[in-house]
């Protein structure tokens, strides 16, 4: 376990200068239940879903607080997935736009490039593409947000603006294969 922490710490320090990794780390600060990935199915105490396939160039990386993250070294890009569920009596019904905006806290000079409705796993979702800066470094982000009952799901793709188009089709395919399995009562 100690060697794992040393390797993880080294990995984080090595990539700490990259704004895309900072985005993944910041994004992962959301409070969510830890889960397990078995094959392509990710399961927490509140929900489960199936993720799409990614090419071998995408490697899973560990992040604290979020569900899953993948890194593409060639593109210096991340794909992240997170679910948050509120089973309390005080359910808040945030709009998909508000949920998207919450993902982008910390991104400065945000510019919305495109936004539109999509359907994912038979649920209405919102796909938005933003250009902005994280720690004064340009970043381009595609965020897809959907909700079902008491759970919110977001999938993001982030890279430098120059390499964004290189991984966008991987992300879009990944999103198209995303399937909600069930929410637990």
Image (cartoon, helix red, strand yellow):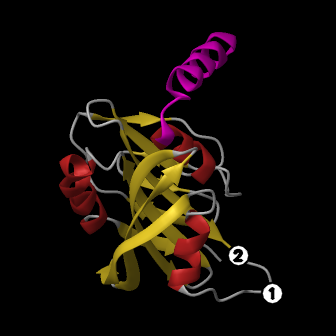
Mark 1 residue element = loop
The percent coordinates of residue 39 (x first, y second) are 36, 45
Decide whether residue 9 is among the magenta residues.
yes
Disc 2 marks which residue? 86
Residue contact between numbered discs 1 and 2, judged by CB atoms under 8 Å: yes
Name the image quarter holding the C terminus.
Answer: bottom right
Quadrant of the rendered image containing residue 178 = bottom left
Mark 2 residue element = loop
- Which residue is painted at 43% across and 62% down in the image? 155
- Which residue is painted at 49% across and 65% down in the image? 110
- Which residue is painted at 66% across and 19% down in the image? 5
The percent coordinates of residue 137 (x first, y second) are 48, 43
Is 180 in front, or is 83?
83
Quadrant of the rendered image containing residue 51 = bottom left
- Which residue is painted at 65% across and 48% down in the image? 65
Disc 1 marks which residue? 90
In the image: residue 132, left or right of residue 101: left
Tell me which segment is drawn in magenta: 1-19
- Say few, some or many: other residues with alpha carbon within 10 Å of mark 1 (under 14 / 14 to 19 / 20 or more): few
């Amino acid at each position: 376990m100690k060697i794992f922490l040393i390797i993880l710490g080294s990995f984080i320090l090595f990539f700490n200068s990259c704004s895309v990794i900072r985005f993944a780390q910041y994004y992962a600060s959301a409070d969510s239940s830890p889960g397990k990935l078995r094959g392509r199915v990710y399961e927490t105490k509140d929900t489960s879903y199936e993720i799409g396939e990614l090419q071998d160039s995408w490697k899973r990386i560990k992040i604290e607080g979020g569900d899953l993250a993948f890194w593409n070294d060639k593109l210096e890009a991340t794909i992240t997935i997170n679910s948050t569920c509120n089973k309390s009596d005080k359910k808040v019904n945030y709009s998909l736009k508000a949920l998207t905006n919450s993902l982008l806290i910390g991104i400065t000079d945000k510019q919305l490039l495109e936004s539109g409705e999509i359907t994912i796993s038979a649920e209405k979702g919102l796909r938005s593409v933003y250009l902005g800066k994280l720690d004064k470094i340009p970043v381009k982000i595609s965020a897809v947000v959907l909700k079902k009952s008491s759970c919110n799901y977001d999938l993001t793709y982030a890279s430098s603006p120059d390499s964004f188009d290189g991984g966008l089709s991987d992300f879009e395919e990944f999103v198209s294969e995303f399937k909600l399995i069930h929410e637990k009562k």
